[in-house]
Amino acid sequence: DDRDDKNRLNRSNGKSEFIKTVNNHNDKSNKNNNSSTTWVGITLTEPSQQSWFDAEGYPLTSRDPETGRFVNPWLSESTNGENGLRKFLRWKFQRVGKVLNEYGINIGVDLQGNHYTDGNGTKSVGNEIQTTSHDSGFNSALPHSSGLSKMGMTSALKETRYSSSLAQTNMHDDAGTNDSIHLTWVGHSTTLVELPGDFTILTDPHFSNYAGPMKRNAPPSLSVNDLPDIVDVVLISHDHYDHLDYWSILQLVDSNKVQFWAVPLGLKDWLMNQAGVCPEKIVELEWWEGVHISKDAQTQPTSAGDEDNAIFSTPALPEVVGLVRKFDITNQRNAKKSPPSNYEKNEMIITCAPSQHWCSRTPFDRNKRLWCSWAVHATPSKYQSPTTATTPTTTPQTHSFYFAGDTGLPSEFPLHRQIGDRLGPFDLAAIPIGAYEPRWFMREAHCNPAEAVKIHQAVRARQSVAIHYDTFDLADEPREEPPHLLLKEVGRVNEGILRMAAEVVAAAEEVKMVAELEAVSGGSVGGGGEIVDALSASPSVLEEVAVAEVGENLVEMLPSLVDFAAIGQGQRFQSMPKAV
C-alpha cells in the first residue's frame, strides 16, 4: 500500500555510526507503528518513504509521488508548499497588524513575535536564543573550534582565559601561501572563494540592487568586473531571488569569466532557457553526486629533475574529468578527499549535499527544482603544494570548503552530522545566520545564530564565516542582531567547553595524587622511599603518566572550541594553514 509505505522509513539495520533503525513494523507491541517512524533516539513524525533514504539512513533526492515536487525526506509535510504558503500569508498579515497596532488600531492579530516556545526545541525571549537539536551531536554546551587544538587545550586551561570577541579571529592575508583557503564576503550568500590549486569559486552570485521586491541595504563589495578573469565554478544552492539573480547571471555570462556552473537538479533548464548559459558549461547534480574537475598547474618543470627552473605558464582553464557517483554502502568514504591522481594536475571534487529548504520563483513552481548545499575538496598539484624542499611534494594535502546555502536545522534528524560524517571535516565553512524571525515561520528554512553554531559543529568545520545577513531585510529581526547573537553564542559554548575541559584536567590531577599516595605507601614499584626520592628528583614522571595518558585522552574526546567569524562585507578571511 503506497499510502501505508509513505508513513514508513527504512527499517533495515543501519550501518551509520550514529543511527540504527528500529524494526517497529515487526514489533506487535507497537500499536502505532504506522503513524510515525522511530529510530533509536530519533522520531520522524511526518510522512516518509523507504525509498527516500539509503540503507545507511542518509536522505536521497526524493519527490512526492503524488505531486512530483521535491521533498525534504525528514520533513515532507512542513515544507511541501501548501503549509509554506499559509504561513507566509499569516506572517504578512501579522506584519500588517503590527504596523496598525503602532497607530492604535487593534485587529486581533497575535503579535507575540519575541516570546515563544516552538516544537523545534527553540526558545526566544527578547534577544536571548537557546536551542536544542539532534544535529548538535553533543551536550547543548558543546559545539566546536576556536583556533585551539584539542591537545593544546590542556595548557590553555592553565591560564583560564578566553575572549568571546571574534575580532581576534585569524583574518590576516598572507598572499603567498598556498596552504589556506581565502574567502571574500561579497554580501548575503555571495562569496568569492580561492582554494589551493589555483581554483576560484563563486557562491550564489548576487550583484543587483534588488532581490525580488527587497532592496539591498548596501552595494555589493565587489562587482562582476572586480572578479578574477577566470572563475572556475559558480555554485548555486537554489532558485530563490536572493540566491539566483537573473541580472547577475546575465552579467556573468557576458563577462565570459565563468567556466562551469554547478547547480542542483532542475536548474539547468532555467540557466539555459532564461539566461542563455551554454549547456556544456552546466553540471547538474542531485544529492551526494559530485563532479571531478582538474586543471594544469601554473608552474611545471621544463624537464624531469629540473624543478628549480620551472616556467610560469599562462593561467590554466578547468576541465570536467567526470561525474562522481552517489555514495552508497560500497563506496569508500576516503574517496571524497581526492580523486586517484599522480598529483601532476590540480584536482577538485565538488559534491552536492542536502540542506533543509525549499524552492520557488513563482506561486506555481514550488519545489519543482532541488535545493542543496555544497562540499568542495581541492588538491593542488605537487608542483604547487607548499614545500621547503627543492623537489615537489609527493603527497599534497586536500583542502575542504563547505557552503551551507540556505538551511534550517532539523529538529528530528541529524542531517548536518550526516554531511560531516560523509563529507567532512572541513577547513572552512560558510554558514547562514540571518532571516530567522519569526521562528514559527522561518525555522524550517533558516537557522538562527545559535543553530548556525550547531551546524558548524555538526559538519565538523575547523573554522566558519557567517553569511546570509545584513544585506537584505528578509525577516523580522534587526539587521545588527545576527552577528551580536553569534558572538554571544560562541562565547557561551566555548566557556562551557573550557569548564568541562577544566574538570577533565582536575580529574587527571586527582588521578596523579592517588598514584603518588599509592606509590609512597609501598606500591609495587620498588620501596616507598625510592618512589619519594624518584618524585623529588623528577616530579614530572607521574604527572606525565596521569595527565598525558588520562587527561589528554579525555580532552581528546571533547569538541574543539568554536571558531566562527562574523566579518564585514568586502573583508577577506584566510583559513588557518593545514600545518597549524
Image (spheres, rainbow, N blue to C red):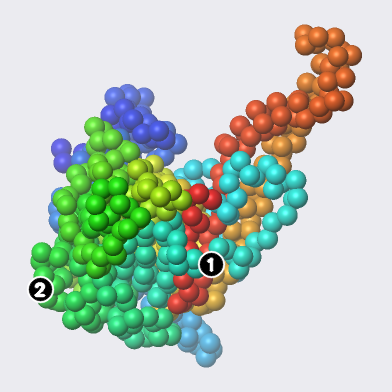
Task: Judge whether residue 140 can be spotted in this image.
Answer: no
Quadrant for the N terminus in the image: top left
Q: Earlier in the sequence, mark 2 or mark 1?
A: 1
Q: Residue at x 68, y 60 (%)?
A: 163
Image position of 233 (left or right of 395): left
Give the percent coordinates (x, y) of residue 57: 31, 38
Q: Quadrant of residue 36?
A: top left
Amino acid marked by disc 2:
Asn
Of residue 272 and residue 191, the one placed in the foreground of this image is 191
Q: Can residue 516 be seen?
A: yes
In this rendering, the answer to whether 131 lies above or below 521 is: below
Measured from the top left, where is residue 407 in percent x and y? 37, 60
- Is 570 left, or right, of 52 in this rendering? right
Q: Are marks 2 and 1 in contact (CB under 8 Å)?
A: no
Task: Residue under label 1, please give it.
Answer: 172
Taking depth in this image into account, of 175 and 461 the one nearest to the observer is 175
Residue denoted by label 2 = 273
Mark 2 vs mark 1, CA separation in Å: 42 Å
Give the percent coordinates (x, y) of residue 280: 10, 64
- Residue 575 horizontal side relative to residue 71, left or right: right
Q: Residues within 10 Å of mark 2 (few under 14, many from 20)?
A: few
Q: Is 503 on the left-hand or right-hand side of 336?
A: right
Q: Which mark is residue 397?
A: none
Residue in the image at 40% along x and 75% along y: 186
Q: Residue furthest bottom?
A: 103
Q: Residue 184 is drawn in which quadrant?
A: bottom left
Q: Residue at coordinates 33% horizontally, 30% vertically from top-left?
A: 15
Residue appearing at x 16%, y 64% in the figure: 282
